[in-house]
Image (tube, helix red, strand yellow):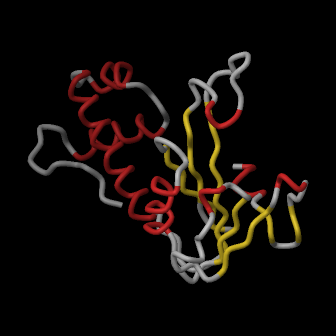
């Protein structure tokens, strides 16, 4: 991974490595500023650049090759407001997740869990020859029509949670 050290900057390589070490041990910018005798704004800018490079690296590495991939959506947020239930629960943030079994996970906050929102994410991150495992949520209807040859479902509504390799326990546990 490329480290965002700028050649010609007024910070030496050794000082940058020190800042990187503080960043990696989760020391905040104010404390790092005091320890390195470099201005807090400069440390904030360096921390921001490091975060951008980490995000770019993660984005590049997030595509799944052919394999078994579990898909699921979830809603995160404060406790349920009395009387409001289900997917439309007020104040909840929808998050879509993908897990390649035995490998890596990809998550993304989405506006909603509609086909129009989820399908572009699925298509950009998976191979059409992958084996896809989902629950019975309607947004996963027709994945075969979009070119995915192997799509298996777990029907939670029928009290089915696992049937051999047909499960989404990995992404649900994540």
Query: Residue at point 88% right, 56% down?
Result: 158
Question: On the picture, is 17 further left or further right than 10?
Answer: right
Q: Is residue 75 left or right of residue 5?
A: right
Instruction: Name the image quarter holding residue 33.
Output: top left
Return the residue found at the far left.
Answer: 8
Q: Is residue 147 above or below residue 122?
A: below
How many numbered badges does the structure rendering display? 0
**Quadrant position of residue 154:** bottom right
Residue located 38% across and 50% down the image: 54
At which x and y percent is residue 59? 40, 58
Percent of width and height locating residue 107? 54, 51
Along the horizontal axis of the image, is 26 left or right of 82? left
Residue sitting at 63 percent across and 65 percent down?
A: 141
Please provide percent x and percent y for residue 9: 12, 42
Q: Looking at this view, name the residue that lies furthest to the top.
A: 82
Instruction: Using the image, determine if residue 135 lies above or below residue 93.
Output: below
Front residue of 129 and 60: 129
At 55% across and 77% down in the image, what residue appears? Answer: 145
């Amino acid at each position: 991974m490329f480290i965002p050290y700028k050649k010609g900057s007024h910070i030496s390589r050794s000082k940058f490595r020190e800042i990187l070490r503080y960043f990696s041990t989760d020391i905040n910018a104010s404390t790092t500023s005091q320890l390195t005798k470099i201005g807090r704004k400069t440390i904030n800018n360096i921390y921001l650049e490091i975060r951008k490079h980490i995000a770019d690296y993660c984005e590049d590495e997030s595509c799944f090759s052919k394999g078994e991939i579990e898909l699921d959506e979830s809603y995160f947020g404060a406790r349920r407001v009395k009387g409001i239930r289900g997917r439309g629960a007020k104040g909840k943030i929808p998050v879509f997740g993908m897990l390649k079994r035995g490998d890596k996970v990809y998550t993304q906050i989405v506006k909603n869990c509609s086909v129009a929102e989820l399908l572009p994410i699925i298509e950009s991150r998976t191979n059409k020859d992958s084996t896809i495992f989902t629950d019975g949520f309607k947004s996963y209807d027709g994945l075969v029509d979009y070119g995915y040859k192997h799509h298996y479902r777990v029907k939670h509504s029928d009290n089915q949670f696992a049937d051999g390799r047909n499960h989404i326990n990995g992404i649900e546990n994540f």
